[in-house]
Amino acid sequence: MKTLAVIPARYDSQRFPGKVLADLAGKPVIQHVWERAGRAARVDEVVIATDSDRVACTAEAFGAQVFLSRTTHQCGTDRVAEAARALGCDLAVNIQTDEPMMEPLLIDALVDLFDAPQVQFASAVAPIHSMVDFLDPNVVKVVCDDEGNALYFSRAPIPWDRAQPPTPGASLPEGLPALKHIGIYLYRADALQRLAALPRSPLEVTESLEQLRILQQGWKMRILEWDYHGVGLDTQADLERLRAALG
């Protein structure tokens, strides 16, 4: 089973333009993601997919394989699908440039899930430990069913504890299954192409979360819980936290 890791990289990010090339411990952010993806034992090939000449030139300078994608893509999933279709694979890994601390062992553990033939889509979550993260719309929350499949993703605080509503400055209610999404997706190649052929779903547009296109179709996404301590990069403040962590 050929596994292709694709890092979709758009220079003009709405929340933080240019973040993919921001300096982090002496390297552009995207180089950290590329290097970590290349350390995963179950990944056969790593490519950076971008429509930006600036990103492409930077990536080629540090030795990355680059796929120049169309400029019309509205989300990373569709950019990954184009690269996967052109390069060929059995399994595609979408590693977001938001995750410069991505763990190679996590990538391998997610690939392992696809040894079960019924798994078509997968992603990862980590426990939320603070009310600050629980209320932060940049931290995507997830609720899952008893079989480990995603029920819903939201920027809102879910699940909502009716008895102890979330309050800024408070502690999380004991036992609340609060989980945050980690910026990585895996897809079987044929399932990815079916997904990319669909229009953006209403929930996907409302929450600005591309994974909701999968759930709105009624398809299953297997979720792996991981003790992940990486810092997701959404804002300038996140970049400063990453610099402190990696500096």
Image (tube, grey):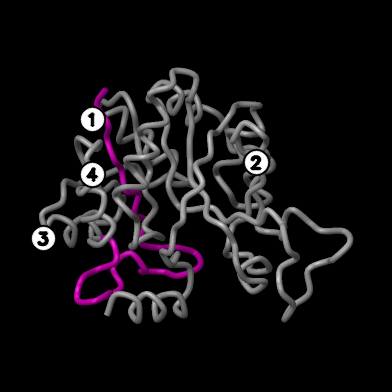
Q: CA distance from mark 3 to mark 2?
A: 41 Å
Q: What residue do we see at 74% from left, 53% from top?
A: 159
Q: Secondary structure at mark 4?
A: strand
Where residue 88 appears, x then y in whole percent?
25, 26
Label number found at residue 6: none
Q: CA distance from mark 2 to mark 4?
A: 31 Å
In this view, the mark in front (2 or 4) = 2
State whether residue 121 is above or below residue 235: above
Amino acid tagged 2? Cys
Give the labeled residue for mark 1: 87
Label number found at residue 144: 2
Give the labeled residue for mark 4: 47
In this view, the mark in front (3 or 2) = 2
Q: Secondary structure at mark 2?
A: strand
Q: Residues within 10 Å of mark 1 (few under 14, many from 20)?
A: few
User: In the image, which residues are magenta?
Assistant: 1-30
Q: Secondary structure at mark 3?
A: helix
Amino acid tagged 3? Ala
Where residue 33 appears, x then y in whole percent?
29, 57
Where residue 49 appears, x then y in whole percent?
29, 46
Q: Is residue 222 magenta?
A: no
